[in-house]
Each structure stands twice: as structure tokens, then as C-alpha cells.
Amino acid sequence: MKNQTTWILLMVLTIGAFFLSKQFNFVYLILGLFTAKFLFVAFQFMELKKAHTFWKFIISFIVILVNFIILIALH
Amino acid sequence: MEENKLGYKNIYYPPGGILLLIIILLELITFGLTLVAMVIISKSNVELFHTSKMMLNTTLGSINTIVLLTSGFLMAQSTHYFKLKNFDKSSFYLKLVLLTGTLFCIIKSYEFYHKSIAGITLEYNTFFTFYWLLTGFHFVHVLVGLVILFIMLLSMKKNSSAVKEEDFEASSAFWHMCDLIWLILFPVIYLIF
């Protein structure tokens, strides 16, 4: 995926999340969208997609774990 | 360069360098745990956190997300052209990163200013203590990132070929860290109730 495609996707997700949060309060969906955006930035812009599997795993693990704990804490 | 010979697939040479990546991971854990603490504390005073969140400007926050993500894209482009030794394009994109980064700081300062003149400071309530600490620390990271990138731009103006690829990549990784931190802060502080 190219940087330009990722940027367009990130803009769509950001605007989508903004309107979604105004209409409803889908906590799962909003956190899911931001986790996806986080991974796009880390893998594409930071080029972690080229890194060793360990680094890909650890960064994905941290963001998923944080959001998972937040979801559990919210309920 | 040793890094290029070994390649990014080597566990010791991730993009941006192993030390910076460890710092990024530690920063993410620190901000993440503080957010978890905030959510846990919010359970004991749901009403206060809800009304406090209603006082935040989600439109400005979303605009800032767009600005910061755009700066991340421009930084990725700058790094891409730097690696291709196209220093003119790389420094052009770097200038745009500095511009968007400054725009982020201006919008954030405007938000901070309006909160403080309304008397919503660090001691206002528990939610705003977290709000000021988390967004304030993130703001400091953005400022440090801007200084690093400005120094990088000056070095490129002096002698582009003397700037090491590892140094440029590390500065780029630091800037992306600001994006990553914001992407975990923004939904929890501004969007979800």
C-alpha cells in the first residue's frame, strides 16, 4: 500500500469516527477504528511492515491490549 | 551503513533504530496505562466525567487529528525521498511537516487558552487533571519533535549528503510517535462516553 492511499484511508476513518461519535456512542467501533488507524501509521508511515516480526507483534500487542483493558474497564 | 547491509528484518535494526523504538514502546505503555487509570477512576464518578467530556471541543480535536495524521503522511514522504537521495523533495516535505506540526500546536494552544480563561485548569476536577496531564505531555512531545525536525532541516540546508539516513529515520520515527500517542489519547479523552 502506498503512503497516499494510507493517508486517504486515515482521513476517511477520522471523519467517519467524528460523525459516528456525534450520532451514536459505539465504543467498540470507535476504539476499533482508532486501533486500525494506529496500525496504519505504525506499519505504513513508520515502515514497521519491513521490520522483524517481533517489532510488528509487540507494537500491535500494546495497542490492542490497552484498548482491550479500556473496554473491559468501561463495562 | 551497517543497518542497510543487515536490513530491517534483523531484530536489532528496526526502522528508526532499536533504542528509539524501545522509547516509543515505553511511551505508549506509559500513556496507555494512564488512560486505563483514567477510565477506571471514571467508573466511580460517571456523571462528573460525562459532563466534563461534554465541555471538550470534539470538532477542534478531530481537526487536530487530521492535521497530525497529515503531518505523519508528509513525514513518511520526506523520509521516502531522503532515502532516494532526492534532497530537494525531502526538504520540501519536511517544511510542510513543520508547518502542519506548528498548526497542530496553534490549534491546541487555542484550546488550552480557552480552557484556562474559563477557569478549567488542572485542579478543576479529576477528569481535567487527566486531560491537562495527558494532552499537555503530548503537546510537549510535539514541540520536541518540531525542534528535532527543524534541526534536521537546518543540517540538510548546510549539507544534505552529510545527514545520516539513520538520524533522519530516527527523527521521523519520533514524529510518528506523536501521531501514535495522539491516536490512543484522542478517542478515550474526547469521543467515548
Image (cartoon, coloured by chain):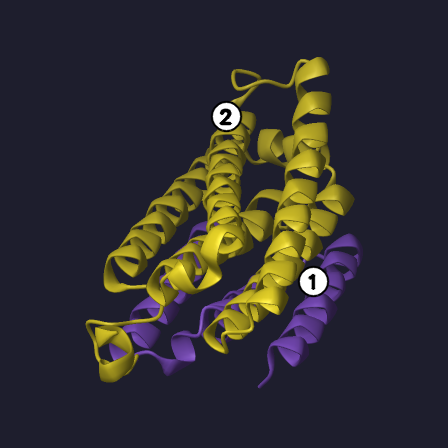
Q: Is residue A75 visible?
A: no
Up-down relation of residue A68 to residue B29 (above or below)? below
- Residue kind at label 1, given as amino acid type: Thr
- Give the residue at x 43% y 51%: A73
Question: What residue does disc 2 label?
Answer: B129
Up-down relation of residue B153 to residue B161 (above or below)? above
- Give the residue at x 42% y 60%: B168
Q: Which chain is purple?
A: A
Up-down relation of residue B88 to residue B126 (above or below)? below
Give the SS element for disc 2. Answer: helix
Up-down relation of residue B113 to residue B54 (above or below)? above
Q: Which chain is yellow?
A: B
Q: Quadrant of residue B16?
A: bottom left
In the rendered image, residue A39, in percent from the top left (x then y), is placed at 49, 71
Residue A43 in the figure: left or right of residue B106: left
Q: Nearer the viewer, residue B93 or A45?
A: B93
Question: What residue does disc 1 label?
Answer: A14
Residue B129 in the figure: left or right of residue B60: left
